[in-house]
Image (cartoon, helix red, strand yellow):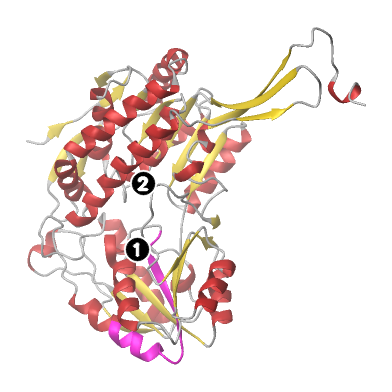
Amino acid sequence: MARTFRNRIGGREVPARSGRTFLNLDPANGETLGEFPASGPEDVNDAVAAASQAFRSWRLVPAPKRAEIVFRAGELIRARKEDLARAMTREMGKVLAETRGDVQEGIDMAYLAAGEGRRMYGVTTPSEMPDKWAMSMRAPIGVAGVITPWNFPFAIPSWKLMPALVAGNTAVFKPAGDTPEMAWHFGKLFEEAGLPAGVLNVVFGSGSQVGHPMVEHPGIHVISFTGSTEVGLGIAGKAGGIGKRVSLEMGGKNAIIVMDDADLGLATDAILWSAFGTTGQRCTACSRVIVHEKVHDELVRRVAERATTLKLGDGLDPATEVGPLINRGQVERVREYVEIGKREGARLVAGGEAASEGALARGHFFRPTVFAGVKPDARIAVEEIFGPVLAMIRTSSLEDAIRINNASSFGLSSSIFTADVNRAFTAMRDLDTGIVYVNHGTTGAETHLPFGGTRGTGNGHREAGHTMLDPFTEWKSIYVDFSGRLQRAQIDNR
């Protein structure tokens, strides 16, 4: 019998007020992993009330002490890394090596965010008036609403919630419906680490019934969202209309540029990993290869041959290289884009169909797919597919490759393979993306550097790194006048 999970509100585990539930399914075989509350606006109200009450005391806890709880949570995550990774593979599908990395990001982020408790720097500066002190400091915003996707169900909540809590905010957390169990573990671990009741509240349910009420709730002061550009822009419109701060991390259409002097063996390895790791379900996944015409045909051959040999299967099987897509709807989306690519005249050189033989028939599998001869403005070259589909585009020069890359409506990650240092530095300067790699694929990020993108990928905020506190803090300027007389700043500053 499937385990029953509940919301975590005000330090208690509670069902949805409506009594409704939904099932969490393993995308590799359709098995039921658990039953979760299908919450609604009334549950959001309860969570916001709990978070608002907790904020009164949590904001007054010294930041180093708040950070110690986050550090202890990191230690608990580290101790349970393997169990968490296996649970994630069962509910999300990606191979065990990747889920271990996902959990490791949570560990890394806990240690990094904990350091901010003693390094939440403000600024002191000389005053323009005598006998006057001037400084600035960070202050928490209040209740943070955090909405996360299913593809990195531990790492992405860590990027958002750990800095928010260290900064003194409380939170209402809505995870994706396809990966609720990892969010339940996340909340439970923080409870064990000593987080006071009501500081972190986890509410399960759909975007329409939980996400939208969170965005519109007057008791939530900042929304941090990762997901599709379409949904993110909708959130920006609604939240902006009521003056709410919003941090958005949205779509990507990332490209690897391969020049004629590149190490094609290394480039092939990186392309395969970037395009088909996580079954292409990463915002940083490589979905375009912009390759110099002198090496185009050879690189297409290498990539296509390797793509057809990748082993599909359950992510818990050590031999599996590509796991399932998250659900049946995503399989149909990928299938539709393959047909679009064919109609657009691209040449299908690998994959192109769902995999349904043997045990694969019980899951949501699609073969790694490679198109060659793709036009730069083709739909499969400009629209986010979020699946294992790669478009290879011919180019004649570095300048043309950069132009093609920057013409995208997204700007998260890009990469160039070249042995020429001048080309590398030109690309580093001119590629208009938040992340640029040289002689590496488009995926992978280290927690101590800012993560985020330009254009349709985000709204200017960055996660992790030295920018982690920015979405969750306000700047407060403080002046202390010890002159014993009224000093009117610019009026008396003659």
Report the residue marked by disc 1.
333
Kindly indicate the quadrant of the structure image that contains residue 112.
top left
From this viewpoint, which residue is outermost toward the front? 131
Q: Nearer the viewer, residue 398 or 220?
A: 398
The image's mark for residue 378 is none
Q: In this view, does 431 lie to the left or right of 477?
A: left
Rendered-image quadrant of the N terminus: top left
From this viewpoint, which residue is outermost toward the top? 484
Rendered-image quadrant of the C terminus: top right
Where's residue 371, x and y in %?
36, 80
Where's residue 274, x and y in %?
33, 67
* Residue 289 among those drawn in magenta: yes
Report the residue marked by disc 2.
149
**Magenta-tinted stretch:** 284-302
Q: Nearer the viewer, residue 164 or 224?
A: 164
Q: In this view, does 267 lie to the left or right of 119?
A: left
Kindly indicate the quadrant of the structure image that contains residue 320.
bottom left
Q: What element carries label 2?
A: loop
